[in-house]
Amino acid sequence: MGHRRKAREIALQVLYQIDISDTDTKEAIELYWNNFEASESAREFSTQLIMGTMENIEEIDTSIRNCSEHWSLERMAKVDKNILRMAVYELIYCREIPPKATLNEAIDLGKDYGSENSGSFVNGILDALYSKLRKDHED
């Protein structure tokens, strides 16, 4: 498994922990690293994803809300919501990462960690968001 894939899994776990327990971001990261190991590159990238997502959570959640017809964030499964948050952070703020890689990784995380419908749910929302971002960028 590549270091970015591992980092995304770690970030998902920490974001989920923050979401269900309302733990401070830095405390949640420290707690994770006190109990688990990973390569330095996975540690760095996962920390970037976690911190970046949490620092921009309001804009990220607004972007998700604008692309999720009939689904409020409160109704979404916490795993799906946090996969979406992390992927939206990557799409908006990590320009060096190819968007298709972000989309594929998010869909795979949904399939691996979510329900049987999570992959297609994540795909639908991210596809709509990515199309909107591309259109906005062209304008």
Image (cartoon, rainbow, N blue to C red):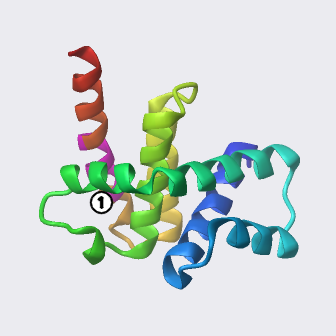
Residue drawn at point x = 38 percent, y = 59 percent: 119
Q: Position of 102 compared to 59: left or right?
A: right
The residue at 13%/58% (across/down) is 69
What secondary structure is marked by label 1?
A: helix
**Stretch in magenta:** 122-128
> Which residue corresponds to the image point at 61% horizontal and 56% vertical from the top-left?
50
Is 62 positioned to the left or the right of 118 in the image? Answer: left
Give the farthest residue toward the bottom.
Answer: 21
Task: Give left or right: position of 39 versus 117.
Answer: right
Quarter of the picture holding the C terminus: top left
User: Where residue 135 sits in the image (x, y, percent)?
Assistant: 22, 24
Main SS of the magenta part reads helix
Rendered residue at 39%/65% (across/down): 81
In the rendered view, tell whether residue 85 sits above or below residue 25.
Answer: above
Q: Could you say which is closer to the camera, residue 101 or residue 20?
A: 20
- Residue 122 seen in the figure: yes
Residue that carries the numbered disc 1 in the rendered image = 121
> Disc 1 residue type?
Phe
Image coordinates for residue 16, horizontal then vertical, percent: 54, 72
Establish if 16 lies above or below 121. Answer: below
Q: Quadrant of residue 45?
A: top right
